[in-house]
Image (tube, rainbow, N blue to C red):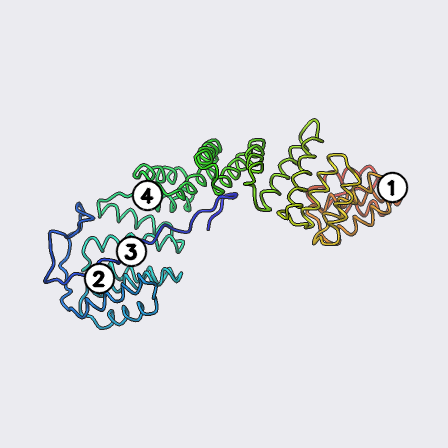
Amino acid sequence: MKHVRGFTILACAAFVLGLASTPVLAKHEDKAKQATEYPDSTREAPKLDLKSEKDQKQLQEGLDAINKGDMATAETTLQALLDSSKSKYAQAMALRGLALIKYRAGDYKASIALLQKALANGVLPNDDYFTVEYMLAVAEQADGQYQASLDTIHKWRAEGKKETAESYAVEGNDLYRLNKYPEAIAAVKKAQSLTDKPDPQWNQILMASYAASGQGDQLVQMARQNLAAHPDDPKALETAIQALQQAGKYPEAIQVMEGARAKGQLTGEANYVLLASLYYNQALSADDAKPMANKSVSVIKEGMSKGIMQPSADNYVLLGKAEYVAGDMPAARAAFNQALPQAKDGEAALQLANMELTAGKYSQAKTMIQQALDKGVKQKGNAYLVLAECERGLHDKAARIAALKQAEQQPESAAHARELLKQLGASGK
């Protein structure tokens, strides 16, 4: 599946089948009822050649087995019919049924091959022919053949002279995956205009296209409208949060999430972590950081007390950082120490090293920063700068220069390290 910062697009549209109808013997055929679904088709309907009642019965048994979910019986019955029948119509319909079996089993390439054989057969009536062609577009989309799917759906529409909401939704999904976002938006809007009951999942394509094309305002407007229409729908809430975050509207995202939290609708660890992180990041840019930082702390503590947020290293690091910004140093130290034993990286140790360094405890800071480097940190250069400061406090010039030369090799700290080395007379690169 394709993702755009939180938006997930369905793999494909529903696999249209319509197997319930009973095959008709050619001698009883009512030509007035031919092509009722495609009355304006440019394709000339061929004559049916299903003359054997045995073939008709066997075909219906296979299709009935599919409808009942008995795929093993269906496959055996339809394959036997395909191998034995002289009727091209029976063969094509057997191929159609076998294609569905393969599709439901996730074997899209096999499904596509069977559908193509059914179309090439040449005897399918227009209703069945165009249904199979539509199925082919959907199967191609499921297999990731988006341009082929788009070409097939265009051919289906041009030859069948039919427009449906679902077909434009398939087209919109193909266009989105081909990075043709304006065209995808237009296709989905066309789909929605053709029905009074649009599939809510189509909005995922529309919003993802807005997100991918940088149309943040449209994205947010859609998400807000959807949430207003479905205030108790968890999916609508999640979509609104994702849209606001995508558009960088963090205060509005906080407002939506707090509203959900007040009603007990904010569930899941990811949402609590996100809300706490939003408060923390707002605190970092605020003139008075303490109120926002305290709110971050409150969210984390509530999440942990309710068992929604796990007492993991990452969550304790976030708590410690929020406590630190809020000015509660003992609480910050306690949170980082809670993270330390279970941490898989050195981020908790790095935070403690910074605290020890700020307190002038250079030996303790050096021990922690070395632990951080040994476990691995996201920005190694900054960690070496901290180590250099520890060595400065311990009056070890040679060790300080060695740490700065390590920092010089990292992109985030190279310029600063080079300047410090120059000041120390240990010329950098």
Q: Report, in whole angstroms, how far the alpha carbon at label 3 lies from the one at label 1.
A: 76 Å
Residue at x 27%, y 63% (from the top left corner): 63
Is label 3 in a helix, a strand or a loop?
loop
Is label 1 in a helix, a strand or a loop?
helix
Quarter of the figure that contains the C terminus: top right
Residue type pointed to by label 1: Gly
Tell me the mark number nearer the camera, choosing from 3 and 1. Answer: 3
Q: Is residue 248 above or below residue 54?
A: above
Residue type pointed to by label 2: Asn
Left or right of 59? Residue 32 is left
Q: Report, in whole angstroms, how far the alpha carbon at label 1 lies from the one at label 2.
A: 84 Å
Residue 188, by quadrant, is top left
Q: Report, in whole angstroms, how far the alpha carbon at label 1 lies from the one at label 4.
A: 68 Å
Q: Which residue is mark 2?
A: 121
Q: Which residue is mark 4?
A: 168
Q: Report, in whole angstroms, how far the alpha carbon at label 4 lies from the one at label 3.
A: 18 Å
For label 4, the crowd category at 10 Å Cα-Cα, with few meaning under 14, some 14 to 19 and many 20 or more, is many
Residue type pointed to by label 3: Leu
Comes first in the chain, label 1 or label 2? 2
Is label 2 in a helix, a strand or a loop?
helix
Q: Report, in whole angstroms, how far the alpha carbon at label 4 lies from the one at label 2.
A: 27 Å
Which of 247 and 373 lies nearest the eye of the viewer?
A: 247
Residue 212 placed where, x, y %? 47, 39
Tell me the mark number nearer the camera, choosing from 4 and 3. Answer: 3
Which of 274 and 272 lies nearest the eye of the viewer?
A: 272
